[in-house]
Image (cartoon, grey):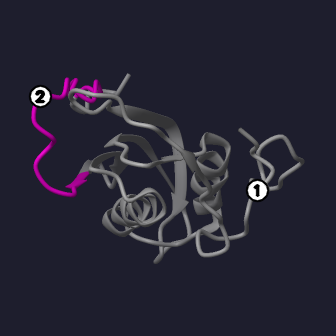
Amino acid sequence: MSYDELSQLGRASSAPASPGEAMLETVPYTRSDGPPAIVRFTCPEFTSLCPVTGQPDFAHIVIDYAPDARLVESKSLKLFLTSFRNHGAFHEDCTVMIARRVMEATKPLWLRIGGYWYPRGGIPIDVFWQSGSPPEGVFLPDQGVPPYRGRG
């Protein structure tokens, strides 16, 4: 199988200036019989900017999805997530924007995201979104991020 159509994997790539400029690339996936696989991406050092103050916000992002015919290519996901470093948006907007872009790119059977945001003003904010009920019969592990108490 050739991956020549990918523009980032195996090539020098710089971080996009914004999430809108970032390209999420996918690769073909052949599902096997039985329950679908669950794929997990964890980004424990996600950063974005507060849209009001311009100060950095930090989160631990966990994406779980059940792929159908396409997988998100991990280098393009890394560059997409990095593009938020200069993006001003509230925690809720960032978390849901990530989920919707992965959904749009891969059209998975199911997706959930947990955005575990470190405290702003002394209050941690956790944001959760999922596309619906998980497929029947899948092994769905806990996202593994402890409730805030120094968070790891």
- 13 or 105, nearer to the observer: 105
The percent coordinates of residue 29 (x first, y second) are 49, 41
- 127 or 55, nearer to the observer: 127
Residue indicated by mark 1: 5
**Amino acid type assigned to the residue bearing label 1 in the image:** Glu
User: From mark 2 to mark 1, how far is it between C-alphas?
Assistant: 34 Å
* Above or below, 67 relative to 50: above
Q: In the rendered view, does 34 fall on the left or right side of 14?
A: left
Q: In the rendered view, does 137 fall on the left or right side of 150?
A: left
As drawn, the label of residue 137 is: 2
The percent coordinates of residue 72 (x first, y second) are 53, 48
Magenta-colored stretch includes residue 141: yes
* Above or below, 130 relative to 147: below
Label 1 sits on a secondary structure element that is loop
The percent coordinates of residue 66 (x first, y second) are 31, 41
The percent coordinates of residue 8 (x first, y second) are 78, 51
Q: Residue at x 55, y 46 (%)?
A: 28
Count all numbered tags in the image, as a single digit. Answer: 2
Q: Callout 1: few (<14), some (14-19), or many (20+) C-alpha neighbours within 10 Å? A: few
**Amino acid type assigned to the residue bearing label 2 in the image:** Gly
Q: Callout 2: few (<14), some (14-19), or many (20+) C-alpha neighbours within 10 Å? A: few
First to last magenta residue range? 127-146
